[in-house]
Amino acid sequence: MDTLVANPVESWYKIVDDSDDDMEVEGSSEVKNTMEVIHGVTIVATVSVSVVEEDMGYQALLECAGLLNGILEALPKSESHVRLAIQRLCEAWWEKGLEKREEFGKTAFSMLLAKSIGPKRLAVDINRLWQFHAALLNFDYNSEDSNEVRNLLLQCSMCINHIKKEEGRRFLSFIFSWDINFIKIIHGTIKNVLPNLPKSLMCHVADIYFRAWKKASGDLLTTIEHTCIQDFMHHGVHLPRKSPVHTKVREVLSYFHQQKLRQGVDEMLYRLYQPIIWRGLKVPNSEVRSNAALLFIEVFPLRSPNMNQADVDNEIQKQFEELFNLLEDPQPLVRSTGVLGVCKIAAKYWEMIPPAMLADLMKKILGDLAGDISSADVRCSVFKCLTILLENKFSHPLLEQMLPSLKYSLHDNSEKVRVAFVDMLLKIKAARAAKFWKICPMENLLAQLEVDSRPVCRRIVNLMFLTLSFLSISQRKSGASGL
């Protein structure tokens, strides 16, 4: 105290009268001595905090710590070691849970927050900030004194280091709980920075939202669902595919879709998608319909655990009807998306889908769309997506019966269709789903090999490698046994 009386805060800065810039001159011997005294007192106070017990009187220590906390902002910038010592004192006071803990915790939190996004930040700074996350709740969101903390928190939400690190994501998800009015601001900030974030970080961004949603309740939960999650859903449907943000929004939504087995997620997705997906599937814009279809396919089936069995059956039937509608859409892009959806859903749920429904879906794809004369893209998508369906071995018997009718697709006038068809045959061969030469005869393959382009011929050669000699040996054996 005597030192501060002898060298008050006003004496730490001297203004040079003849300077145009009002430059601060620091470093007089008196100031240096004062800083050393303050530093030493802070170290002693910090050590004293560690030995204080609840039943001990520490009023003098509290006054000393309060005085040091009060002069923190007045310290010259060059005295970083003194600032750090006072920060450590505030951290120790908060952790010890002593009287006026909240005020010291706010100081420690502000300094840790600033350091975690500063130019010299370290990974350990983010860890330390997470340990003090609860101190945020001592700040009054509506107070002007909290403006600096609000700005620092928004910078945090844009910091890649925080997004990458586990403790950073925990912290970012926690700040959603500070105040309901802050949620919209955080969400807007994250959306603005999405174009500059790599796609590989989208699962981490989604994890932040998911953690915030899991921890929230009441009005906070409602706000996160409608302001954040449903906003991503809306953009997932309505953003143009050329937008640099479209695929990133899809990645965020995919993370939520992958959590469907966790408690509450299925019901939340069903409820929030209701006003978005079904409307998106009916709009005049074909790109929007296709975007809605992609989300519908990924999140299928949409249902609430609160439904009874009759309602579930009706809902699933309605969704299968939507799949048929996609396959009959006037736009090729939407039909191709529908083919992808049917094959993905059938591959995943083949054993649970009624056989009559499977037969109708396969008849539509293999009987109609594989020969869609209006679009080579649709024909190509049929053979590309069948490779997905072939991953499920239970689909092989039905496909073995139906695929031979498509043998003339090898001679399609579009190269990409021929490439996709031979790729499908290669998949059939690899999966041992059927004998590929019974789907497309060898004479057709050999004839096409003579006249086709290099990409197709290369695939035909790979398909037939070792097969011709095998067939020749088999035929000779059959002939010998016949004799």
Image (cartoon, grey):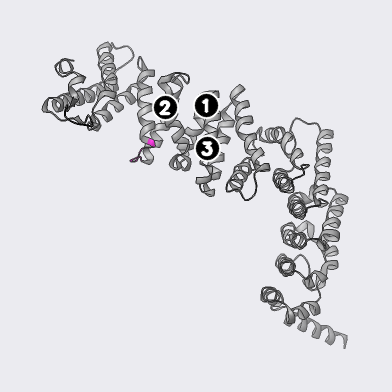
Residue 142 relative to residue 224: left or right: left
* Range shown magenta: 116-121
**Image quadrant for the N terminus?**
top left
> Which is the main secondary structure of the residues drawn in magenta?
loop
As drawn, 378 above or below 135: below
Q: What is the count of numbered marks?
A: 3
What distance separates the C-alpha of mark 1 from that of mark 3? Answer: 12 Å
**Image quadrant for the C terminus?**
bottom right
What secondary structure is found at the residue carrying circle 3? helix
Residue in view at x 80 percent, y 31 percent:
308
Residue in view at x 72 percent, y 77 percent:
452
Residue 65 relative to residue 345: left or right: left
The amino acid at mark 2 is Val
Label 3: which residue? 190
Label 1: which residue? 182
The amino acid at mark 1 is Phe
The label on residue 149 is: 2
Q: Is residue 118 magenta?
A: yes
Q: Quadrant of residue 261?
A: top right
| Among numbered discs 1 and 3, the one appearing first in the sequence | 1
Q: Where's residue 294, x and y in %?
A: 70, 47
